[in-house]
Image: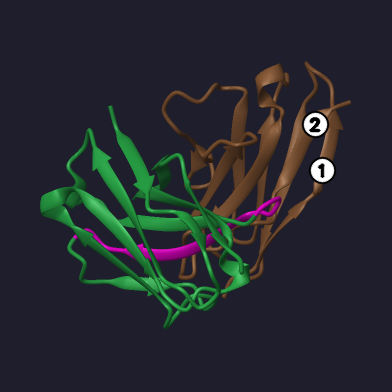
Chain colours: A brown, B green
């Protein structure tokens, strides 16, 4: 199975900051990577697919990049509603593994 | 409006069985592959199972293989997860989700608690 790692595991930031989260796959997954946002008690919400394509309705302050094994989610000008946990997921091969998550909380 | 509504969760003893359902509406269910994803309390997301639109292909996580069975009824717009030989470590919120590129719609989740 492809193992996904994320760094950092948590980050403290302030409104208006730029936050960058890294996701690494244990083997190449081309661009078959998605990013999700999850708030406490809620289902995850798809932000980005195909590594860099913004899902419809997602604010443009979110962006994704990368291919192969290394990927990045960037949140520009952090807003209060962005404090949440973020997960990457590869859908290159089964099992479609998730990363362990990165919690973005208020500094 | 796309909606996925899970049901069937609850408290069950170890070794018991439970069947989760996910009722879909607002889209042509038969055209989409579907997933089950679970989240243990305070933990991250774990992919559990996948079924193709026509039920021709199914996949399972190693942690549930041989114990869980995914199925669907396209006439009823419903997805199912039959869970047998349940263990303490199966305790989680179970989500159904629709696949496009990534999982674009998720249900609200159904809590399964395995405990004696």
The residue sitting at 45% across, 39% down in the picture is: B108
For label 1, the residue is A10
Pinpoint residue B59: horizontal percent, then vertical percent. 38, 72
Residue that lies at the very extreme toward the right in this rendered image: A107
Tell me the crowding category of disc 2: few under 14, some 14 to 19, or many 20 or more residues within 10 angstroms, Cα based: some
Quadrant holding the N terminus of chain A = bottom right
Residue A78 visible, this orientation: yes
Quadrant holding the C terminus of chain A = top right
Query: Does A34 sit left or right of B89 as displayed?
Result: left
| Residue A84 in which image quadrant | top right
Front-lying residue, B17 or A45: B17
For label 2, the residue is A105
Tell me the crowding category of disc 1: few under 14, some 14 to 19, or many 20 or more residues within 10 angstroms, Cα based: some
Residue B46 magenta? yes
Residue that lies at the very extreme toward the front in this rendered image: B116
The residue sitting at 35% across, 41% down in the picture is: B5
Compared with A87, B54 (above or below) is below
| Residue A102 in which image quadrant | top right
Range of the magenta residues?
B41-53
Label 1 sits on a secondary structure element that is strand
Pinpoint residue B28: horizontal percent, then vertical percent. 17, 42
Compared with A74, B81 (above or below) is below
């Amino acid at each position: 199975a492809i193992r996904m790692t994320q760094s950092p595991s948590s980050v403290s930031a302030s409104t208006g900051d730029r936050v960058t989260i890294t996701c690494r796959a244990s083997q190449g997954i081309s661009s078959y990577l998605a990013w999700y946002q999850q708030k406490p008690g809620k289902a995850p919400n798809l932000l980005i697919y195909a590594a860099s394509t913004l899902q419809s309705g997602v604010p443009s302050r979110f962006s994704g990049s990368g291919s192969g094994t290394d990927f990045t989610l960037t949140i520009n000008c952090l807003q209060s509603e962005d404090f949440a946990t973020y997960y990457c997921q590869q859908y290159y091969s089964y099992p479609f593994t998730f990363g362990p998550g990165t919690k973005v909380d208020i500094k | 409006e796309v909606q996925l509504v899970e049901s069937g969760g609850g408290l069950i003893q170890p070794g018991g069985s439970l069947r989760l359902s996910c009722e879909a509406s607002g889209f042509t269910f038969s055209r989409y592959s579907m997933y089950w994803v679970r989240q243990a309390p305070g933990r991250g997301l774990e992919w559990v199972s996948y079924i193709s639109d026509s039920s021709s292909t199914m996949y399972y996580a190693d942690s549930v293989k041989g114990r869980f069975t995914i199925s669907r009824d396209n006439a009823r717009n419903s997805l199912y997860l039959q869970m047998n030989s349940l263990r303490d470590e199966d305790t989680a919120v179970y989500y159904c989700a629709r696949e496009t590129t990534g999982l674009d719609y998720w249900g609200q989740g159904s809590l399964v608690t395995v405990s004696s």
